[in-house]
Amino acid sequence: MATRMTDKTPLPLLAYRIAGTAIRPLSQIYLQRRVNQGKENPSRLNERYGHSTVARPGGPLIWIHAASVGETVAVLPLAVRLLQEGSCQNILMTTGTVTSATFVERRAVPNLIHQYAPIDFPDCVGAFIDHWKPDLALFAESELWPTMLETLGERGVPAIMVNGRISDRSFQRWKSLPQTILHLLGRFNLCIAQSEDDGTKLKELGAEKIVVSGNLKFDAPPPAVDLVTLSDFKMQIGGRLVWVAVSTHPGEEDLAADAHEIARRTVPGLLTVIVPRHPERGSEIAKLLQRRDFNIAQRSLNEPLGSTTDIYLADTLGELGLFCSAGHAVFMGGSLVPHGGQNPIEPIKLGAAVIHGPHVHNFAWIYDALDRAAAGIAVRDSLELADAIRQMLTKPTSRQRMARQSQEIITGLTGALDRTVQLLRPFCPGRG
């Protein structure tokens, strides 16, 4: 059982459950809209309702829930370690996005089953837990789904937060609902936080048993790179200098195009590679850039990269390693628009020196460490971005120094995986 929870369910949670039941008939419309947007797999919508065509394997099973690709990258090595050391026989991993599902499936980990997470409605969650009967549930980072947590508590299934994170925005929101967050956090047997700041926030919100382990993302391996594909891509690039805009969000593609136009005045033959955070936006981005008279090649359409290509639109899944390895400089998206920034760890592990905008509150302490060590460049707009690109591309010695310092910072922050596994062992169902 969980360590503690408030005596009765707070009104906001009761209202949440009632509302979920009331709007349940509309879920089909909602999911179909997501299918049309490329955000759902139409052949697996039954999983969203808690139903599966996959039989539950015999023996102990741990359920790990991660929201999207970033969380999945962090917890997949944890899942592999738990399986390898016999802490459980099987692991069920749920995620909420097509990209994260593809990431898990491409790894093909033995005894690991992927399912899409059920919608957080009582009947969907109930059907899901009835089918899978987990012995332990692990929730990655900031996944606090009320119905999931309530149902697990009612069934006596222990729940643990791993790589726990509370953003400043979420912290302020939860502070306005003190009894609600106290109740939800009371469902966790243990909260394993990724930083001292996150641990402090969790404590202020009412969590009781908190341990700071470090960030699992620092222990995750770099994205895989197919050497044959990389060699072929570099041949297409030729001798051109390349910068990569990684995980861009709406509005940043225009800014990247502005920076390209400015930077190529002093960097002849400049090639810009744009890797959108959501590849399904590829056609939308291509039209935007074509209206500005750029010569675009779109990877998802197998369009060739030629000597006259201005911008290569890398709107595919699972190829971040390829583009970061081929680029000479990397800009981290989600940071020139008020999104909060994307995690720079993967590009850094691939040897990149990173540029970022001012909006990095989701990973502030990582970017602060990079900036303090002069291992990253902070920019405020497309003009400064263009100047940073020029600096990195025309001063390779400085760029290589920044990349080395970045890797040293990341290496010094590893060890969270070992600490997390040790903390989880007393809760793991074992081989049975």
Image: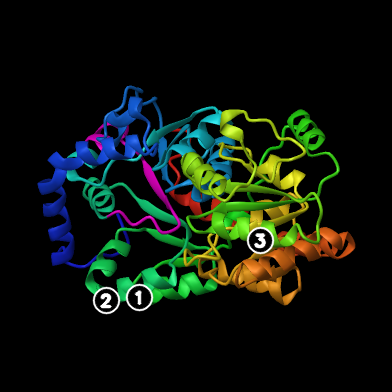
Instruction: Quadrant for the N terminus, please.
Output: bottom left
**Quarter of the figure that contains the C terminus:** top left
Find residue 134 and report its horizontal and vertical position in percent.
Answer: 35, 38
Q: Is mark 1 on a helix, strand or loop?
A: helix
Crowding at label 3, few (<14), some or many (≥20) Cα neighbours within 10 Å? many
Residue 172's label in the rendered image is: 1
Q: Distance between the residues labelled 1 and 3?
A: 35 Å
Q: Quadrant of residue 363?
A: bottom right
- Crowding near pointer 1: few (<14 within 10 Å), some, many (20+)? few
Q: Which of marks 1 and 3 is nearer the N terminus?
A: 1
Mark 2 and mark 1: Cα distance apart in space: 7 Å
Task: Determine the secondary structure under disc 2.
Answer: loop
Left/right placement of residue 74 relative to residue 379 reads left
Label number found at residue 176:
2
Disc number lying in front (2 or 3): 3
Cα distance in 3D space between marks 2 and 3:
41 Å
Residue numbers of the magenta segment = 127-145
Q: Does the magenta stretch include residue 130?
A: yes
Is 188 covered by the magenta stretch?
A: no
The residue carrying mark 3 is 259
Identify which residue is drawn at 60% across, 68% down.
357
Tag 3 or tag 2, which sits nearer the N-term? 2
Q: Residue at x 32, y 22 (%)?
A: 53
